[in-house]
Image (tube, rainbow, N blue to C red):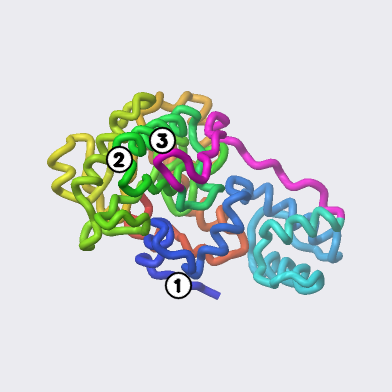
């Protein structure tokens, strides 16, 4: 069954504007398993289903209709939601039934291992904790900017911090960025002191305070800022580091300057993501669309299929 999600609803969820987007539960359930849904992972539960249910599935790593039906059968027999997806609950039950340990998650960037606290001086978080890992320097830069923000503007709203990276880095659906623990989404500042989502087209948007936020991020004292993507043309004109980008009217995408990836990191990404040759010099490699559709959400009709998303969402 194909599920159709509106692009604007996906953007609202990622910006923290909505907590009841239809695909939110799927994303929350699968984020801790990111990087494990590879051919080897599918082979693992195909072997397990053959052993447990006495089937003769082809152990080829392809999530075809017969494998999906077998997963649903296993779930129904064990009182789980029969959605045909091997999520965390199904995986745990397979292990309990003697499947053995699943393939280990690939750690593509070991240094992306520091989680941002849910709140601190001058900031709060609105994204899932699983999506808020970064380099140690990135976390320090954000905390430094937050402390300076609170010290200089104690009466202003705190800085709202969204997506960074997954633990260990790598592809974080649906972004093609946010891979190396050095990029972060921030909310613009409101005029009324609130901390809810705001778009540059709304009356509650405070351009002057958002420009002050840009300055605080730039002068964090820990990491230089390579680029900030934000759609307010006035802020773009005021600060050369800011560039407009479609789909960034309700959040600032901050990219800190970090060393270029090593040849070993490029090799790991290429092997893990079936690299299709696209390389942007910062995020190393963008996963091929076949990888995203076949591996990222095995057993599901991928609601985040990049082939259906605009560049604004994929950025």
Which mark is drawn over residue 4? 1
Distance CA(mark 2)–CA(mark 3): 16 Å
Q: Which residues are magenta?
A: 98-124
Q: Which residue bears the numbered disc 3?
A: 142
Q: Is residue 148 left or right of residue 83?
A: left
Q: Which residue bears the numbered disc 2?
A: 153
Residue at the image position 45 percent from the left and 43 percent from the top: 164
> Which circle's residue, 2 or 3, is located before the other in the chain?
3
Assign a secondary structure to mark 2.
loop
Residue 106 on the magenta span:
yes
**Residue 247 in view in this figure:** no
Distance CA(mark 2)–CA(mark 1): 43 Å
> Which circle's residue, 2 or 1, is located before the other in the chain?
1
Q: Is residue 84 left or right of residue 16?
A: right
Residue at the image position 65 percent from the left and 64 percent from the top: 85
Residue 281: image quadrant is top left
């Amino acid at each position: 069954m194909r599920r159709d999600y509106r692009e604007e609803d996906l953007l609202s969820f990622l910006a923290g504007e909505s907590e009841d987007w239809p695909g939110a539960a799927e994303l929350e359930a699968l984020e801790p398993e990111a990087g494990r849904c590879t051919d080897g992972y599918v082979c693992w539960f195909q072997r397990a289903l053959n052993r447990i249910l006495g089937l003769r599935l082809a152990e080829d790593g392809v999530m075809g209709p017969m494998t999906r039906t077998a997963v649903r059968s296993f779930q129904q027999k064990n009182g789980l939601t029969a959605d045909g997806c091997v999520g965390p609950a199904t995986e745990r039950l397979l292990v309990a039934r003697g499947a053995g340990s699943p393939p280990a998650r690939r750690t593509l960037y070991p240094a992306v291992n520091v989680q941002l606290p849910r709140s601190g001086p001058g900031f709060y978080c609105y994204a899932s904790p699983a999506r808020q890992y970064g380099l140690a320097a990135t976390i320090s830069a954000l905390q430094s900017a937050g402390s300076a923000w609170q010290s200089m503007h104690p009466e202003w709203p705190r800085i709202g911090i969204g997506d960074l990276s997954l633990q260990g880095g790598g592809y974080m659906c649906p972004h093609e960025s946010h891979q190396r623990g050095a990029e972060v989404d921030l909310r613009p500042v409101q005029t009324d002191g609130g901390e809810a989502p705001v778009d540059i087209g709304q009356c509650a948007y405070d351009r002057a305070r958002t420009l002050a936020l840009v300055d605080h991020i730039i002068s964090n004292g820990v990491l230089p800022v390579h680029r900030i993507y934000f759609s307010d043309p006035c802020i773009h004109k005021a600060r050369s580091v800011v560039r407009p980008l479609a789909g960034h009217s309700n959040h600032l995408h901050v990219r800190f300057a970090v060393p270029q990836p090593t040849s070993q990191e490029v090799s790991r990404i290429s092997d893990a993501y079936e690299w299709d040759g696209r390389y942007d010099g910062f995020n190393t490699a963008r996963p091929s669309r076949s990888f995203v559709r076949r591996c990222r959400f095995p057993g599901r009709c991928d609601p985040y299929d990049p082939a259906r998303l605009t560049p604004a969402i994929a950025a």
